[in-house]
Image: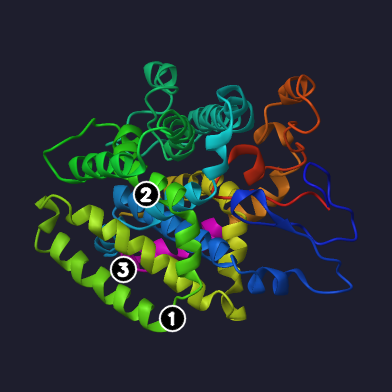
Amino acid sequence: AARGQRAPADLVPAVRFGGGDSVTVNRSVRPASEVMLESPRAWVDFAKGSAIILVVLYHCSLFLSEVGLAGSTPRLRAVLSFMPMAVFFFIAGLTARRSLSWTFPELWRRRIAGLIYLYLIWSLLRVVFYLVVPHLRESESSPTDLLVIALLPVWPTSSLWFVWALALFAVLAWLLRRVPIRLQLTLTALLAVAFTTPGLLDTNNVGWDRVGQNLFFFLFALHTADRIHSWVTRVRRWHVAVLGVAYVLLAIVLIPLHGVRIPGLALLEGVIAIALTVAVSQTFVRLRWLSVVSVLGQASLPIYLVHLFFIAAVVALLAPLAQFGDLSNYANLVPFVLAVFSLAASLALGKLLRRVSWLWVNPLRSRLNRRVSPSQSAPSQSAPSESMHGLPMPGLPPKE
């Protein structure tokens, strides 16, 4: 199926990778799973799936901590905190290179406007959600506070900061396109060191802090995409072992030994985390019993957007029961059970919501598309996809 057209009913959903490329195969010839697993860049979906699993588990532990049911997972959360979002921004950078050749109006139409719409519409849905469901996180500003709502465009206060940051990164990468690459990477690496070292730089805002921490990963991948894809083809199992040991050892230095206070170590751990995720993904993506990870990776956008609704609702229901000893005895298990439930429920809900196009694409977008030539027109609104928003987390495939 050509880009911007709905896939015919006799074809399997398109498998989307970095840069908006897709592969469509007739059901009578080869199953989609074979195409996905054999593609040279199949590791991208596996990496996104691994990252979204860790994001959901992280949030389960975070919310359950408010009611005393997180068990020992806060320690695990600390160890894994260097990995998932760095991976997502890294993959976003791999797919963003072509945007540097666009004019700013093209960048706005083809990427930024869609990301801003996605961020704002889901932020408003979050506000409506918390008008019904109690907000239990005392350390976080109330989502229904009028000042918080008014500042959403410039002061993100929820997990949706990621979509907001992608729009900002697209602008920054475009503005810096004529700056020497080494200078870009040096300055953003120093910025990351400042934001990841306690006491150096802290805006007290999740969005701006994460921007400072992750811009380096985005730009590094953007400017070295060819070298990265070349390295991936040479990955061997020993890379996984070496990187895994390095990650664990440095995590021990950072957390129990308080090495996070040493400038640069947290950034180094992020680099190792990305390399480890890529190596693991390339090594294990062809194991069919792990294909569910790639499935989650393909649907990581809707999962990311809706999973906190399930987590917050379940935790609100568990809150009155948390004081009973019987439930607290299983505190080490509860976060993992909730994570599995949230992933499955988010995946199912995402499939249902893909038919509601305004959740993913500005309904006024078609008016803008009429003003540009056919060769410049944006993709169809049939489903959320990487080619629409430049997201490293492709949405659901075209409706069958």
Q: Which of marks 1 and 3 is nearer the N terminus?
A: 1
Horizontal side of 341 relative to 60 (left or right) equals: right
Observer able to see residue 338 = no
Horizontal side of 2 relative to 161 (left or right) equals: right
Q: Name the residue under label 1.
A: 236
Question: Which residues make up the magenta segment?
Answer: 325-344
> Residue at 46% across / 65% down in the picture?
337
In the rendered image, the vertical position of residue 216 relative to residue 113, given as above or below = below
Looking at the rendered structure, the kind of residue marked 3 is Asn
Horizontal side of 391 relative to 67 (left or right) equals: right
Choose between 210 and 344: the one closer to the eye.
Answer: 210
Q: Name the residue under label 2.
A: 217
- Neighbor class of circle 2 (other Cα within 10 Å; few <14, some 14-19, many 20+) is many
Q: Which of marks 3 and 2 is nearer the N terminus?
A: 2
Q: Return the mark for residue 98.
A: none
On the image, the x and y values in percent for residue 265 come to 18, 56
On the image, the x and y values in percent for residue 382 come to 77, 40
Circle 3 sits in a helix, a strand or a loop, which is it? loop
Q: Which of marks 1 and 2 is nearer the N terminus?
A: 2
Looking at the rendered structure, the kind of residue marked 1 is Arg
